[in-house]
Amino acid sequence: MPDYIPRSDTGFQLWMGNFVTYATAHFADLGILLADMMPISSASMDFTMKMTANVTAQQAAQSARQAKDDSRDALETAVRQMVQRLQASSSVNDAERAALGITVADTIKTMSVGGISTRPIGVVDTSQRLRHEIRFSDEATPTKRAKPAGVMGCEIWVKVSAAGEAAPSDADGLSFLSLDSASPYVAEYDGANGGKTAHYMLRWVKSGGEKGPWSETVSATIAA
């Protein structure tokens, strides 16, 4: 039998308001006294106040997060423009590029795995409760969503572990999550996983089934 108390906070607040209003107006019919309702009325008012404060805090956090993301976008644009100038400049050598932490041209041919030499880069959006939005792009073109030539999708594997547990260093022990053809992929979790950490590893898969090298491990907390 389903619980008569709504699961969501909003539904519970509405249900509680109706309960207090009706009970207060029908003391005699229900065989209760005002004193019987006082603890419930007081707790209901406290819950409403705390819920309002929580909603306000969440809105402020979302606004702050958007401001942070906008600031990062602007900063990334500015620094990429500068790096383009530096990469094109004959005054900058490879040692200086390495010191700056920017790309140094690889003069040694990279061995590929399954005909794919690059790896996906994974970024996890944790802003929603019990939900991860996994965005992926290729390390050769990190600002674009395009997959490498011949690739049909991104294979996503995951391991969910207790908070604080070390992230896996390889794919052993991970479970297959999805082969997704377009970023982003959305992973939904149940309440029992709230507060735990999801560790993801990704790799490209070509149309013929060939698989590329594994990405770096990307870890994110599952918001409860």
Image: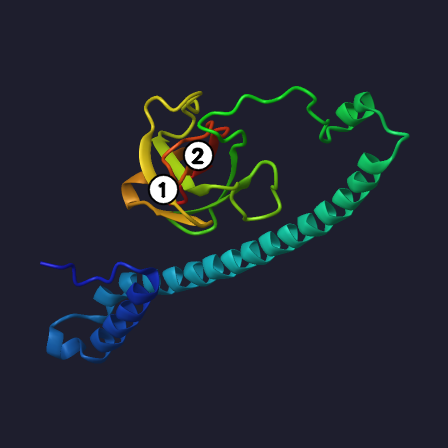
Q: State the SS at label 1.
A: strand
Image position, residue 12 (x, y; %): 29, 64
Q: Looking at the picture, which amino acid does disc 1 mark?
A: Leu
Image spot of residue 84 (x, y percent) = 79, 41
| Residue position marked by numbered label 1 in the rendering | 179
Note whether 153 is above or below 173 in the view shown.
below
**Between marks 2 and 1, how big is the CA–CA gap?**
9 Å
Left or right of residue 72, residue 27 in this image: left
> Which residue is located at x 50 percent, y 28 percent?
216
Residue situated furthest right in the rendering: 91
Against 214, residue 149 (above or below) is below
Q: Considering depth in this image, is 81 or 217 the residue closer to the camera?
A: 81
Q: Is residue 118 left or right of residue 39?
A: right
How many circles with numbers are drawn on the protein?
2
Q: Quadrant of residue 51?
A: bottom left
**Is 58 or 210 nearer to us in this picture?**
210
* Residue at the spot of label 2: 202
Classify residue 108 as left or right of residue 211: right
